[in-house]
Amino acid sequence: MKTRIMKTLTILAIVGILPALALSCSPALACNTIDNGFKCITVHGQVVNNDFGFPLPLTLDIKLAGFQKALIGTGTSEDPACGTSIIVVTGSINGHTLTLSGWVIKGIDTPQLKGTKVQLIADCQSGWMTYTFGPISQGLPLSGLTFVFTGAGTVSIN
């Protein structure tokens, strides 16, 4: 049953119904006023990975909707190496921590990234984020590798 619900929510996120709900949300709440009601969350971050000996920047833009313990959404991750990827994520808020996990549903510039796992852990007070990308799906020179990006951003909760 849970699997069927998650598949349905994923389809809704992909076709844009849940991001459209985010447009009708109330003003932002402070992190310390999070309750169990319906949430619209926007995440924007500038994170960096230094595994290559130089900083590789990545930009995140994610829109989520749902409840404190049941969020789903879509977004993009964009970096100079792989270009833009569309991601779908699910997750929750626990205290001041937003935790999301999902996968690339479409690699716009690098189609082989489809299916690559992603995870985001963000502190909605400080804005500190850790974004894990990988293991990278098959068909690329970096297949099987996982990269961790860290940096600052914003988590807006409405």
Image (cartoon, grey):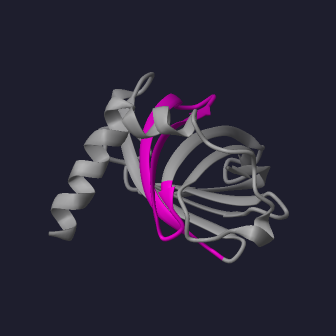
| Numbered label tally | 0
Is 115 left, or right, of 64 in this rendering? left
Q: For residue 111, which quarter of the picture?
A: top left
Q: Where does the N terminus fall, quadrant-wise?
A: bottom left
Q: In the visual, does 139 lie left or right of 97?
A: left
* Quarter assignment of residue 23: top right
Give the residue drawn at x 57%, y 36%. Answer: 24
Q: Which residues are magenta?
A: 66-94
Above or below: residue 68 compared with residue 11: below
Residue situated in front as seen by the camera: 88 or 35: 35
Residue with the most extreme top position: 109
Kindly identify the residue that appears in the image at 19 percent across and 65 percent down. 3
Residue 131 screen position, x and y as percent:
61, 56
Secondary structure that dominates the magenta span: strand
Residue 43 showing in the rendered view = yes
The residue located at (75%, 49%) in the rendering is: 28
The answer to which of 2 and 129 lies nearer the viewer is 2
11 inside magenta stretch: no
User: Considering only vertical position in the picture, is 136 above or below 106?
Assistant: below
Work out whether 107 lies above or below 145. Answer: above
In the image, farthest residue toward the bottom: 95
Q: Position of residue 138 (x, y in %)?
A: 29, 45
Residue 20: image x %, image y %? 47, 32
- In this view, the residue in front, 83 or 18, is 18
- At a point 68% along the width and 47% down the height, the residue shown is 52
